[in-house]
Amino acid sequence: MERNEFIKSLGLGVALVCTGSCFSGCGKKSDSPEPNKPGGGPVPPGTGVNVDLNTQILAVGASIVVSGILFIRIASGNTTSSFAATQATCPHQGGSLAFIEANNYIQCSLHSSRYTTAGAILAQPNDGGTTSALKTYPLTISGNTLTATA
Ligand code: FES
């Protein structure tokens, strides 16, 4: 093999090695976990999401977000009619929803749409868009555990 041919073949080999490592690096998925979401992310349909009634949403008007579900205590007592459970993100553009106890409605943090605790629309978004009714979840109680089925 001539010197020039040897150098050319060496250069081609180096180029192939560099290209291969670049492609394998580009295809690698990130190992970093998803950022934390308050209340956890949504769960698959049919999954039970629990609230401990010994320690959570004890007072009328209290609310909590667990796994993408907004739980609200709407009356005293521990029967299913004492609670409401709706989606925790707005159907309009995904803003977070919060129960406003003083006004007895659920409000979006992004464009201020408002809903009843049963999920009906009280006010459309303030950006001129339209929203839809909130998803609500069936509730059961076993002992002191309130469960919404996603
Ligand atoms: S995202 Fe809720 S009103 Fe726009």
Image (cartoon, helix red, strand yellow):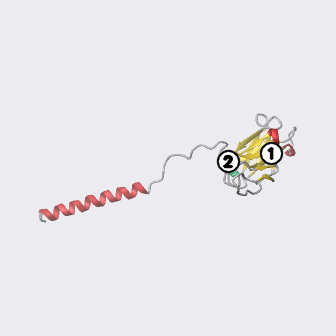
Residue 45 position, x and y percent, is: 71, 55
Q: Amino acid at mark 2?
A: Leu
Q: Quadrant of residue 8?
A: bottom left
SS for callout 2: loop
Callout 2–callout 1 Cβ contact below 8 Å:
no
Q: Amino acid at mark 1?
A: Tyr
Position of 80 with respect to 36 (left or right) is right
- Would you call the spot at circle 1 few (<14 residues within 10 Å), some (14-19), or many (20 or more)? some
Q: In front: 83, or 1?
A: 83
Is residue 22 shown above or below 79? below
Q: Nearer the viewer, mark 2 or mark 1?
A: 2
Q: In front: 39, or 95?
A: 95
Residue 2 position, x and y percent, is: 12, 65
Name the residue carrying label 1: 105
Residue pictured at 45% horizontal, 54% vertical: 28
Is residue 3 shown above or below 71? below
Quarter of the image with the N terminus is bottom left
Q: Which mark is residue 62?
A: none
Q: CA distance from mark 2 to mark 1?
A: 15 Å
The disc, 2 or 1, on the residue closer to the chain's N-terminal end is 1
Q: How many numbered callouts? A: 2
Can you tell me whether the CB of the residue at mark 2 lies under 8 Å from the nearest atom of ligand 1? Answer: yes
Residue 115 position, x and y percent, is: 79, 50
- Would you call the spot at circle 2 few (<14 residues within 10 Å), some (14-19), or many (20 or more)? some
Q: In front: 36, or 101?
A: 101
Position of 33 with respect to 27 (left or right) is right
Residue 57 position, x and y percent, is: 78, 37
Name the residue carrying label 2: 110
Residue pictured at 42% horizontal, 56% vertical: 26
Residue pictured at 82% horizontal, 35% vertical: 59
Position of 11 with respect to 97 (left or right) is left
Is residue 17 shown above or below 88? below
